[in-house]
Amino acid sequence: MFFIIFMTLTSYTTIDIPEMMAQTAGRSSWIPILFTSVLFGISAVMIAKLNNMFLGKVFFDYSQEVIGKFFAYVIAVYFIGYFLMIGVYLQYKMIGVLASNFLPKTPKYILMFLGLVLFACVSYKGITSIARIFEIYGISFLVITLTICVFMIVDGDPYNILPLFNPSDVKEYANTMKDLIIPFGGLEVLLIIPFTDKNKKAPVKAFFSLLFIGFFYVLVVESTIMNLGINNTILLNDSFIEALKITEAPVIERLDIFYLTFGLTSLFSGMIIIFCAVVEYVCRIFSKVKRLFVVTAVGILFFVVCLATSSLKNISKTYESFMFYPIIISCFLIPLVILILAKNKKRTQKHSRKRAEQ
């Protein structure tokens, strides 16, 4: 569960979060990051508690028991659209990284097609196989990134991040936390994972997983600013990669290429789990359709939507401009409402049983 959360949330965020935070909270970025991680930690607790209340079932299954089939299907369709938007965003980010660093002459639609074929093949195997892959990808990505950040801190200038707290930045915290909603979006993939009786401690572990991700983001932001300075971090696109280019490390001559080689696993992981989330919801809605057909249809849908949105000048800005409310609804509102209704229903059923026994 930790690696599913970690690899989903950090898909591309590691690369662009330093620039975003430097623009808003500056040297005090660590404060809103940790506050936001705590808030989303609460969301993770709600989702984990929901899954623990209905062992062996996913959200689509138990939501029908709580709110009825009609509203369960409505929410399922909403989640399909929601994950589709995240998937298109990550797909373009992945293509951008591949095109700018590895395959500049390859047409983007070819990269898009090959990527979707890969994601479709892995998603066809189901969530259990994906979880095993994430354990391997997650450990390698985490170890490599943490090691690189250590090199960046050793090579950087600590004065670039001082003072750690600037009172004049406090007024920007609200806007900063609003921007941080995007890097923490995608947590809802936990809703497609059925829990067992071995997951009793999942709420606590989910909370600390989000807190760990918050500290991970702080490390990435601070190490980048230490190398580039606050102004260069603001001005440069993909500032984390730019900081790697000037960081000296023993043996490894190009830290940026070394990181991107492993960093792509995070982007692939994010796309795989998002693709799988869409497949799982479609499979639940059309339960009589074979999974292979669903996976193929979802892959075609992603490809068509990506091509249709390719004319947009700045997909990132467009995505970030309207995804705030969908993420809040998906991470907080829907789990909270279902959790309250589920607890009330179970309490009512418990009272009914006691009356029947009496």
Image: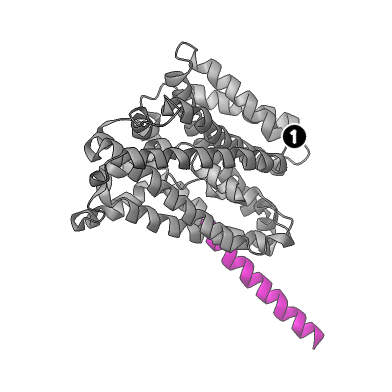
Q: Nearer the viewer, residue 39 or 231?
A: 231
The tally of labels here is 1
Element under disc 1: helix
Report which residue position mark 1 lands on. Answer: 291
* Name of the residue lying farthest toward the bottom: 358
Any part of residue 46 in sight: no
Which residue is at a point 66% across and 51% down the rendered structure image?
60
Spot occupied by residue 37 in the image (x, y as percentages of width and height): 44, 55
Left or right: 269 in relation to 297 = left
Identify the colour scheme used.
one colour
What amino acid is labelled 1 in the image? Arg
Q: Which residues are magenta?
A: 333-358
Image coordinates for residue 164, horizontal then vertical, percent: 26, 54
Q: Confirm whether residue 98 shows in the render.
A: yes
Query: Residue 184 vs residue 291: left or right?
Result: left
> Outermost residue toward the left?
168
Residue 260 shown in magenta: no
